[in-house]
Image: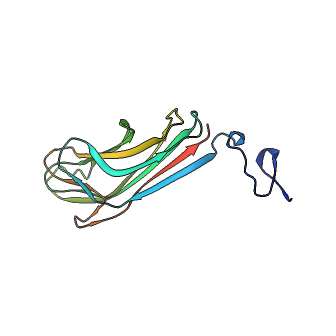
Amino acid sequence: MPLTQVQGGMILASGQSIPKAALPTGSVLQVVNVAYSTAASRSSNVYADTGLSASITPTSATSKILVMVSHNGCRKDSNNTNLQVILLRGSTQISGIDGAGGFTNSTATNDFGGISISYLDSPATTSSTTYKTQFRSEGNNATVYVNNVNGSGSTNSTMTLMEIAA
């Protein structure tokens, strides 16, 4: 059986894998990626789900989860409002993504493209953990959108979760 030498001097037979416990700090243990393309709109200043979410089950309670979100098709309709988007783990807000998306200080419509975030989380669990985004119309007086192209079509938003050995 051919042998392969890997980092740290471990020797494994071809086709074998390194035990996760033997991987160095900073190693990527697993990756989850989702794409979501349904347009969503909101006129209220109460947060609601955008529909973009992903779940991961960490292999160790000490692992970190790198959460990368890219929301596309962001838009603000007329009236003086802006799009606000937050990142949640379960039902707990862990970060803001955009606090003033599309703000023009006017009644002008604004298709401003996309917003994104990379956030390193420490969920301290080995249970399935769900991350999601929520949005609202801050001014509570006009409609804001995600996954909406020029008010007429939809585009993809993505979320990638990477478990990082700690």
Whole-percent x and y of residue 28? 61, 47
Residue 20, position as x, y percentages in the image: 67, 43
| Residue occupying image coordinates x 49% and y 35% | 123
- Give the quadrant of the N terminus: bottom right
Quarter occupied by the C terminus:
top right
Task: Give the percent coordinates (x, y) of residue 115.
Answer: 36, 53
Quarter-wise, where is residue 37 in the image?
bottom left
Is 93 rendered above or below residue 155? above
**The one of 96 and 164 positioned closer to us in this rendering:** 164
Residue situated in front as seen by the camera: 50 or 149: 50
Is residue 166 positioned above or below 34 on the image?
A: above
Q: Residue at x 52, y 32 (%)?
A: 124
Front residue (pair 15, 29): 15
Q: Is residue 118 shown left or right of residue 99?
A: right
The tally of labels here is 0
Colour logic: rainbow
- The relative height of residue 63 versus residue 149 in the rendered view (above or below) is above
Query: In terms of depth relative to the viewer, which is nearer, 2 or 153?
Result: 2
Q: Position of residue 47 (x, y in %)?
A: 25, 42
Name the residue located 13 percent from the left edge and 47 percent from the top edge.
141
* Left or right of 31 in this view: 147: left
The answer to whether residue 11 is left or right of residue 65 is: right
Left or right? Give the position of 5 relative to 81. Answer: right
Residue placed at 58% from the left, 49% from the top? 30
